[in-house]
Amino acid sequence: MYQDKTLVCKECGKEFIFSAGEQEFYAERGFQNEPQRCKSCRDQRKTASKGPREFFTATCAKCGKEAKVPFEPKTDRPVYCSDCFAQIKGE
């Protein structure tokens, strides 16, 4: 029923494909307008609207090194540096 369409991004002017699967998804959700921006421009707008991410400093519960984390550490839960976290996830 749906066929791929080539659209032009209103942000960067590049052509992008509005696939049949995406069109079906839009129809299922009741969206009536086609996308006006390509995926990379949509992603840029999403990240720009979030603003800069705040990081907190914590001490790794396993090795004792300083770790920067994107959440405020709680005293009741351990926080791990990226190396120790990867090691724990691999176990």
Image: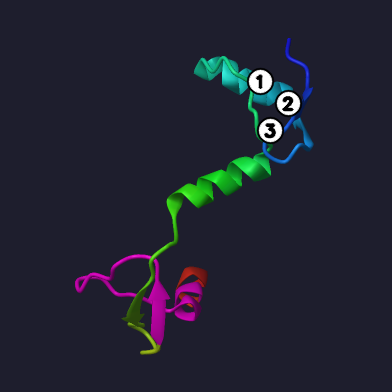
The span from disc 2 to disc 1 (Cα, nearest Å) is 6 Å
User: Mark number for residue 10?
Assistant: 3
**Distance of mark 3 from mark 1, alpha carbons?**
18 Å
Q: Residue furthest top?
A: 1
Q: Which one is closest to the eye, mark 3 or mark 2?
A: 3
Crowdedness of circle 2 by 10 Å Cα count: few (<14), some, many (20+)?
some
- Residue 81, quarter of picture: bottom left
**Residue visible at 73% across and 10% down in the picture:** 1
| Nearer-N-terminus badge (3/1) | 3
Q: Residues within 10 Å of mark 3 (few under 14, many from 20)?
A: few
Q: Quadrant of residue 25?
A: top right
What SS does tag 1 mark? helix
Q: CA distance from mark 3 to mark 2?
A: 18 Å
Residue 16 percent across, percent down from the top left: 77, 33
Q: Which residue is mark 2?
A: 19
Nearest to viewer (mark 3 / mark 1): 3
Q: Which mark is residue 23?
A: 1
Left or right, 1 with respect to 53, comes to right
Q: Residues within 10 Å of mark 1 (few under 14, many from 20)?
A: many
Q: Position of residue 9 (x, y in %)?
A: 71, 33
In this view, the residue in front, 65 or 39, is 39
Amino acid residing under circle 1: Gln
Q: Which residues are magenta?
A: 66-86
Is residue 74 shown in magenta?
A: yes
Task: Name the secondary structure under disc 3.
Answer: loop
